[in-house]
Image (cartoon, helix red, strand yellow):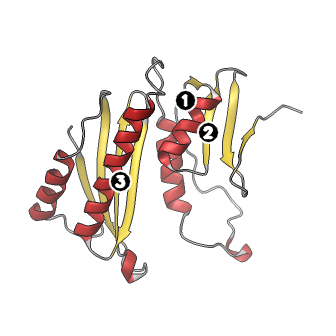
Amino acid sequence: MDVQIKAHNFKLTDEIREYVDRRVAKLDRVSENVTDAKFEIREEPHHHPSQKYIAQFTIVTKRAVLRAEDKNADVNAAIDIVTDRMARQIRRFHDRKVFRNRRDATSLGVLAVDQLEDETATGPVDDDDVATEVVRTKRFPVLPMDTEEAIEQMELLGHDFYVFFNADSSQMNVLYRRRNGDLGVLEPELA
């Protein structure tokens, strides 16, 4: 698997690059064709000292998106934890086999949701801080899937919501986790 390693807000040394390569090489093989694999490391000096380094590993296949993230004070510890989490994601992906019968399903929409969550997950928001204008628009291709597959994809990614094109109703839906832990589906209707 060819992994793109990127660093934000700090210099990516050869030592760190080699360490990431060694850790990624130990991962189980993803049985699907990997279309994209990114390992990003960010230093956020304004965060709490115990969350100074953020490591994020994303693997995109034709049938699923696997993602793991960790925040830690030590860059090597963050790399270790995120690769261990990705190994568990890969095992879950292999064990579930939900995506085996899907032909050309892709979840690029999840990447856009991940990026949107990363940009908006800066902590609690006061009512005075709420933006009153749209500052960014994301567009992404989606292919049909049923609700069960959307649930599996949301659980694989560890998200609280998932936008998908429902093959049964032929419309966009939003799957979300309710406060009590149950799941809900938003099915928009034109008024």
CB of mark 2 within 8 Å of CB of mark 1? yes
Tell me the amino acid under the disc marked 2.
Answer: Val
Percent coordinates x, y for residue 127 in the rendering: 74, 74
Q: Distance between the residues labelled 2 and 1?
A: 9 Å
Residue denoted by label 1: 142
- From the viewer's perspective, is residue 171 above or below residue 173? above
Which mark sits nearer the N-terminus, 1 or 3? Answer: 3
Which mark sits nearer the N-terminus, 2 or 1? Answer: 1
What mark, if any, has residue 85 been given in the picture? 3
Residue denoted by label 2: 163
- 181 or 116: which is nearer to us? 181
Q: Identify the residue shown where x is 61% and y is 51%.
A: 160
Residue 31: name its quadrant.
top left
> Dot 3, crowdedness within 10 Å: few (<14), some or many (≥20)?
some
Residue 34: name its quadrant.
top left
- From the viewer's perspective, is residue 41 above or below residue 23? below
Q: Determine the secondary structure under disc 3.
A: helix
Tell me if 152 is positioned left or right of 22 in this view: right
Q: How far apart are marks 2 and 3 (CA)?
A: 24 Å
Tell me the amino acid under the disc marked 1.
Answer: Val
